[in-house]
Image: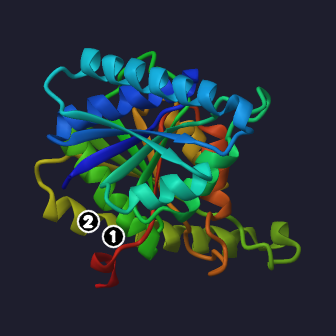
């Protein structure tokens, strides 16, 4: 099924919000929607009850998806095994994966569940994590953009989303004082010059995207602040925040960088995490 969007279903409130988001996205971008419930290996006495629960959850999710977007083709599937492994395997044939921020087994105090964090870290396609129903629409998609390979992939996805929504793109570049600079207060002038240079480079990096996509309004912002804090502020008036799986300075062995993990934990609007693609080797 080419061009499908996959959403994980477990009957939880965040998962229902994810199904709604996925259905609306499928409608906007002319995609089909595939709903997946993973049946973990329960003790035999609970196995039949869990199977019934999964089937009921899928029926309810499909009905809700049709309410949101009646023209979207919706298919359902029950898989058995480890939730993270099965969702990652299934994502290989999808264009995008949409998950609730926490599932049925999550602790109420945890903003980001282990399943959504793991899938966002390992899936090869964009993963959108949805916390709840949107209370307002702003017509703006925010992207963290630092010129890295991951952020170029993020920008491509952001522009695609903005075009489908007829929304504008807002690119945020956040620069921090290097931790290696001792007695930073004594070098205010030097640091100001360094930030101005970073600002200039960041603005120039956005220019080609405007030239290549004249139909999409692209604004940009450069701030001297922690990237997570900057994106949290920008998210207050965003329909979606997009980040790369890792930015500049990330350890190669880290699946999710500190910024993407921080954004997933603190931003309340839907967050898309994207990984670099071959197209961004240019």
Q: Position of residue 212 (x, y in %)?
A: 14, 64
Q: Is residue 55 left or right of residue 131?
A: left
- Of the numbered discs in the image, which one, if any, rests on residue 204? 1
Q: Position of residue 159 (x, y in %)?
A: 26, 52
- Which quadrant, please, contains the C terminus? bottom left
Q: Position of residue 71 (x, y in %)?
A: 13, 25
Question: Tag 1: Cα neighbours inside 10 Å, few (<14), some, or many (≥20)?
Answer: few
Question: Tag 2: Cα neighbours inside 10 Å, few (<14), some, or many (≥20)?
Answer: few
Q: Secondary structure at mark 1?
A: helix
- Of the numbered discs in the image, which one, if any, rests on residue 178? none
Relative to 140, residue 251 above or below: below
User: Is any part of residue 169 visible from this angle?
Assistant: yes
Find residue 265 and report its image quarter.
top right
Provide the residue designation for mark 2: 207
Q: Position of residue 230 (x, y in %)?
A: 59, 47
Q: Are marks 2 and 1 in contact (CB under 8 Å)?
A: yes
Q: Residue at x 66, y 72 (%)?
A: 254
Q: Residue at x 63, y 44 (%)?
A: 40
Find residue 102 and report its image quarter.
top right
């Amino acid at each position: 099924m080419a061009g499908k969007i996959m959403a994980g279903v477990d009957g939880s409130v965040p998962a229902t919000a994810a199904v709604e988001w996925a259905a609306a996205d499928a409608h906007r971008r002319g995609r089909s929607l595939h709903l997946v419930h993973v049946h973990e290996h329960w003790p035999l006495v609970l196995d039949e009850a869990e199977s019934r629960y999964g089937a009921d959850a899928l029926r309810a999710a499909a009905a809700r998806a049709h309410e949101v977007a009646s023209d979207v083709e919706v298919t359902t599937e029950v898989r058995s095994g480890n939730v993270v492994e099965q969702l990652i395997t299934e994502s290989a044939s999808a264009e995008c994966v949409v998950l609730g921020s926490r599932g049925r087994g999550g602790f109420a105090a945890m903003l980001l569940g282990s399943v959504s964090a793991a899938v966002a870290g390992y899936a090869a396609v964009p993963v959108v994590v949805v916390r709840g129903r949107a209370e307002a629409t702003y017509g703006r998609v925010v992207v963290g953009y630092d010129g890295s390979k991951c952020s170029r992939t993020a920008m491509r996805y952001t522009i695609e989303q903005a075009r489908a929504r007829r929304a504008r793109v807002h690119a945020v570049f956040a620069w921090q004082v290097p931790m290696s600079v001792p007695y930073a207060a004594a070098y205010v002038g030097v640091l100001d010059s360094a930030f101005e240079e970073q600002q200039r480079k960041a603005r120039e990096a956005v220019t080609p995207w405007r030239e290549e996509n004249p139909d999409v309004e692209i604004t940009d912002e450069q701030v001297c602040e922690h990237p997570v804090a900057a994106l949290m502020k920008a998210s207050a008036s965003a329909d979606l925040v997009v980040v790369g799986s890792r930015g500049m300075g990330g350890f190669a062995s880290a699946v999710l960088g500190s910024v993407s993990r921080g954004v997933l934990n603190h931003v309340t609007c839907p967050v898309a995490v994207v990984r670099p693609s071959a197209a961004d080797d240019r």
